[in-house]
Image: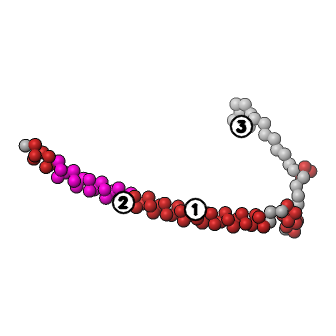
């Protein structure tokens, strides 16, 4: 009687374990694919950051930046006379402002 019960349990457990292994394998490959996609995106971002840092180093001096901005169209340095300040005071309990 006990041998029959043990055999029945093994007959049911072995296919269940195989199904679980296949499901885990599928999840593993999905995670690996996502990881590779993220690594590729990260390498693109790193390359873009390197280019930006080299451009910043190239145009890093303040005098060079000022000269290029003055040469650009529509550039005007802002000062206190050209600045508009808007102050918003908090309202207490009013919904209409």
Residue 50 visible in rendering: yes
The residue at the point 85 percent across, 61 percent down is 62
Q: CA distance from mark 3 to mark 1?
A: 48 Å
- Measured in 3D between alpha carbons, the distance from the residue under mark 2 to the one under mark 3, in whole angstroms, is 57 Å
Q: Are marks 2 and 1 in contact (CB under 8 Å)?
A: no
Q: Residues within 10 Å of mark 3 (few under 14, many from 20)?
A: few
| Mark sitting earlier along the chain (3/1) | 1
Residue occupying image coordinates x 10% and y 47%: 4
Q: Disc 3 designates what residue?
A: 96
Left or right for 70, reference 32: right
- Give whichever of 89, 61 is nearer the camera: 61
State the residue position of label 2: 26
Mark number displayed over residue 42 = 1
**Label 1: which secondary element:** helix
Contact, mark 2 vs mark 3 (Cβ under 8 Å): no
Element on which disc 2 rests = helix
Q: Earlier in the sequence, mark 2 or mark 1?
A: 2
Q: Residue furthest left?
A: 1
Classify 10 Å Cα crowding around label 2: few (below 14), some (14-19), many (20 and above): few
Q: Nearer the viewer, mark 2 or mark 3?
A: 2
Q: Is residue 18 magenta?
A: yes
Q: Residue at position x 65%, y 66% from top? A: 48
User: From the viewer's perspective, is the residue at label 3 or at label 1 nearer?
Assistant: 1
Q: Quadrant of residue 78?
A: bottom right
Q: Main secondary structure of the magenta part?
A: helix
Q: Secondary structure at mark 3?
A: loop
State which quadrant residue 33 falls in. Answer: bottom left
Q: Position of residue 93 (x, y in %)?
A: 70, 31
Q: Which residues are magenta?
A: 9-27
Pick the front one: 25 or 85: 25
């Amino acid at each position: 009687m006990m041998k029959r019960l043990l055999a029945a349990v093994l007959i049911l457990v072995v296919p269940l374990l195989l199904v679980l292994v296949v499901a885990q394998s599928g999840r593993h490959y999905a995670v690996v694919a996502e990881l590779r996609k993220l690594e590729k995106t990260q390498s693109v971002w790193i390359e873009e950051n390197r280019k930006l840092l080299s451009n910043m180093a190239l145009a890093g001096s303040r005098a060079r930046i000022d000269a290029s901005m003055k040469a650009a169209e529509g550039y005007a340095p802002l000062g206190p006379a050209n600045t508009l300040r808007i102050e918003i005071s908090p309202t207490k309990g009013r919904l209409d402002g």
